[in-house]
Amino acid sequence: MKKFIAFYILFTVLVVKHMGAQTNASTGSDQIIPGAERMAVYLPMLKGKNVAVFANQTSLVKNTHLVDTLLKSNVKIVKIFGPEHGFRGDADAGEHVSDIMDKKTGIPVISLYGDHKKPTPADFKDVDVLIFDIQDVGARFYTYQGSLQYYVEAAIEQHKPLLILDRPNPNGYYVDGPILDMKFKSFIGMQPVPVVYGMTLGEYALMLAGEKWLSDEANKINTYNVSTNPTADTPFHVQVIKCKNYDHNSLYKLPVFPSPNLKDMQAIWMYPSTCFIEGTVMSEGRGTDKPFLIFGHPTLPKNLYSFMPKPNAGAKNSKCFFQQCYGWNLSGNDEEVLKKVNGRVQLKYLLDAYSLFPGKDTFFLKNNFFNKLAGNDILMQQVKSGVPENEIRKSWEPGLASFKIIRKKYLLYKDFED
């Protein structure tokens, strides 16, 4: 098999008219079109090639899965890779996902959330071209950007061309939260970015390459530097197939939901704020019909909203099952929830919960998982010390200002600050 030695990092350039707060519910020429649906752009690159696809249930071309669509177009798919929650998206959060043979297509599915997270040379054997097409939600502790990093690293290290079929970021209209301290690096936070980074995965991949945030081996091979030469020769080829009619003011509503406990758009919008509850002893709503929109604990005041979490298909194991919990219900209509978020990571709910919790010493999980979510050990101490929300937010400002300068270099779409 020929190796791809001298390709360019490219990205498809589109002239996109700024649409303000546009949504994908619109019809006609301004409808947001994800990269996967722009098949005329990338199908010629797959002709006669052995293709591997990193995908899950969100990888749709209109109403048909990308894998099925490519097979109908006579593309030879030799293997599929799956992320956390699996190729079909039905595994619990953190659940070990095994390799399988896809029953519908007969194509082997290699789990990158099982025995290993980074593709091996054996995984890429007999593969000519790689595709990545997964819907992100734009929060640092969501693992799909970690999977993307490992996939990009492996592509560079093994000299495989990679197509990233970009998708809109439903939380791509703001940047906020504490910056990750690399001492707290984990698969739920691999880079020094804020909780909400305001980038699509295509943009994020270019940042990984341009900032040399990849593995040592990949960084030695990769010479991409957008600030000096955006088409610098590299020993591999990455192309981002851009979304059409999308920018960072767009209000994009997902056609299919990305994991079992993000069941609707309200949960996706609230997730960057309420995921901190995962690092506490309180229920974050897993085992209910509104995870990340409702949260609470049996010891909180009984005049609060009440609910009882129970095991279900998306939450077989979690906190407070079969216990009456008292807390908050943040759901409502879409307009109400977006107003609650207000384009920022909302600390109010975490601070209110801590204030009312009777056993302060037991509020945070003993394994310090909260610090992994926060990306530092400062936020926990600020909460314990009663630091007001506005002071906590001020402590984020220098890091956010620095990150925004980095982020700006890699944007493929008009920014919300332009």
Image (cartoon, grey):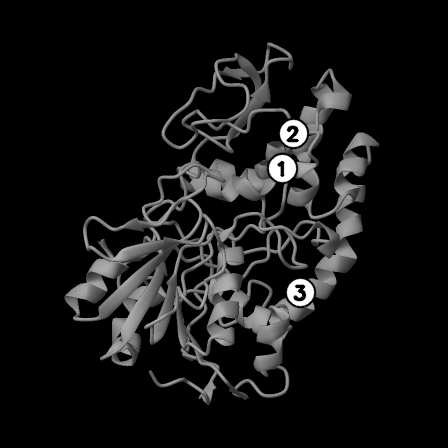
Q: Secondary structure at mark 1?
A: helix
> How far is disc 3 from disc 1 in space, using C-alphas?
23 Å
> How far is disc 1 from disc 2 in space, using C-alphas?
7 Å
Q: Secondary structure at mark 3?
A: helix
Q: Residue at x 53, y 63 (%)?
A: 149
Task: Answer above or below: position of 204 versus 370.
Answer: below
Q: Foreground: 364 or 229?
A: 364
Task: Answer above or below: position of 16 versus 120.
Answer: below
Crowd tier of the residue under label 2, counting other residues whose Cα lies within 10 Å: few below 14, some 14–19, many 20 or above: many
Residue marked by disc 2? 280
Disc 2 residue type? Thr
* Residue 403 visible, this orientation: yes
Q: Residue at x 50, y 37 (%)?
A: 337
Residue marked by disc 1? 276
* Mark 2 vs mark 3: in front: 2
Disc 3 residue type? Lys
